[in-house]
Image: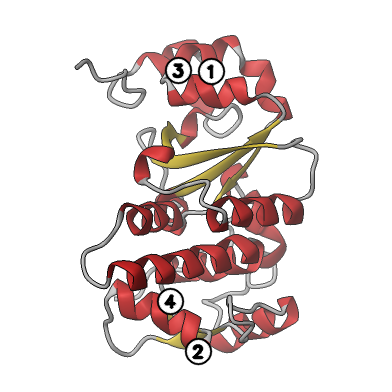
């Protein structure tokens, strides 16, 4: 059964970085692959080997190794029609092409290097591609508080600092969950030291360099963040008590 189409799906803050492209497909029904490929051509999307990216109908199931290798070898991204997960993946390619291209290249290199079992780098790239978020701001202290799970300090005491932060959700699985949000949705984050007023293109390129230059090499290099804790992203977080729910804002594990 096909998912239900919602033309207003990108109207909330977590989808803001996709909006220049989502606004081009908000007709009465699901966008066709021809429409997506028209946008890909307009955007001049290419893979790491400079081949044009095209969203092709996925007719057969394929494993991750074949999926990633196919994108790098041919530029073809297997895409299910009338499917939120794959549509959000396509929109992320349009919004953050440098990061998506880098993640594919890193995945393929990691999988070739091991030749068999997955590596920590491959696991990290998969995790970020599905559930990643980049947090950019001029003060690394906010990222450090989040990594240390000092939730009250990060979200309550430093609430004003979020005005100087830019957030881009890379993980299309997280975006899919945010179509029907609940407080426990968690992303895996990378912090970049950059002015929140820098444009999205520069942040996209900087994120790509982080991956290509080995700035992230294992899942532990990413830190968890409940995304609806972001000020302005969920009405309930206007009340400080929201951050006291330890089933969502989990404390550091005691060892």
Point out which mark residue 151 bears.
3
Say few, some or many: other residues with alpha carbon within 10 Å of mark 3 (under 14 / 14 to 19 / 20 or more): many
Q: Nearer the viewer, mark 2 or mark 4?
A: 2
Q: Which of 194 and 18 is in front in this view?
A: 194
Pointers 4 and 1 in contact (C-beta within 8 Å): no
Pointers 3 and 1 in contact (C-beta within 8 Å): yes
Q: Where is mark 1, residue-wise? A: 154
Which residue is rendered at x = 66% and y = 77% of the image?
45
98 lies above or below 206: below
Q: Is residue 215 left or right of residue 140?
A: left
Q: In this view, does 60 lie to the left or right of 44?
A: left
Q: Which of marks 4 and 1 is in front?
A: 1
Point out which mark residue 74 bears.
2
Image coordinates of residue 100 in percent, x first then y, are 55, 64
200 lies above or below 155: below
| Quadrant in the picture for residue 151 | top left
Mark 2 or mark 4: which comes first in sequence? 2
Say few, some or many: other residues with alpha carbon within 10 Å of mark 1 (under 14 / 14 to 19 / 20 or more): many
Image coordinates of residue 70 in percent, x first then y, are 42, 84
Image coordinates of residue 223 in percent, x first then y, are 42, 34
């Amino acid at each position: 059964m096909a998912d239900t189409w919602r033309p207003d799906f990108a109207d909330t803050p977590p989808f803001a970085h996709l909006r220049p492209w989502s606004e081009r497909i908000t007709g009465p029904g699901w966008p066709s692959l021809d429409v997506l490929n028209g946008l890909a051509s307009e955007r001049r999307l290419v893979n790491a080997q400079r081949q044009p990216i095209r969203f092709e109908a996925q007719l057969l199931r394929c494993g991750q190794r074949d999926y990633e290798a196919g994108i790098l070898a041919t530029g073809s991204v297997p895409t299910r029609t009338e499917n939120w997960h794959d549509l959000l993946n396509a929109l992320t390619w349009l919004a953050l092409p440098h990061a998506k291209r880098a993640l594919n290249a890193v995945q393929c290199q990691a999988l070739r290097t091991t030749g068999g079992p997955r590596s920590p780098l491959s696991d990290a790239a998969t995790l970020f591609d599905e559930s990643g978020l980049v947090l950019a701001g001029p003060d690394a202290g906010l990222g450090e508080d989040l990594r240390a799970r000092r939730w009250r300090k990060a979200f309550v005491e430093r609430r004003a600092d979020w005005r100087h932060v830019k957030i881009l959700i890379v993980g299309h699985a997280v975006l899919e969950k945010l179509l029907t949000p609940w407080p426990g949705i968690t992303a895996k984050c990378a912090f970049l030291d950059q002015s929140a007023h820098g444009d999205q293109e520069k942040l996209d390129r900087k994120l790509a360099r982080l991956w290509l230059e080995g700035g992230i090499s294992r899942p532990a290099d990413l830190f968890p963040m409940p995304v609806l804790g972001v000020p302005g992203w969920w009405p309930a977080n206007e009340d400080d008590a929201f951050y006291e729910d330890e089933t969502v804002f989990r404390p550091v594990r005691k060892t």
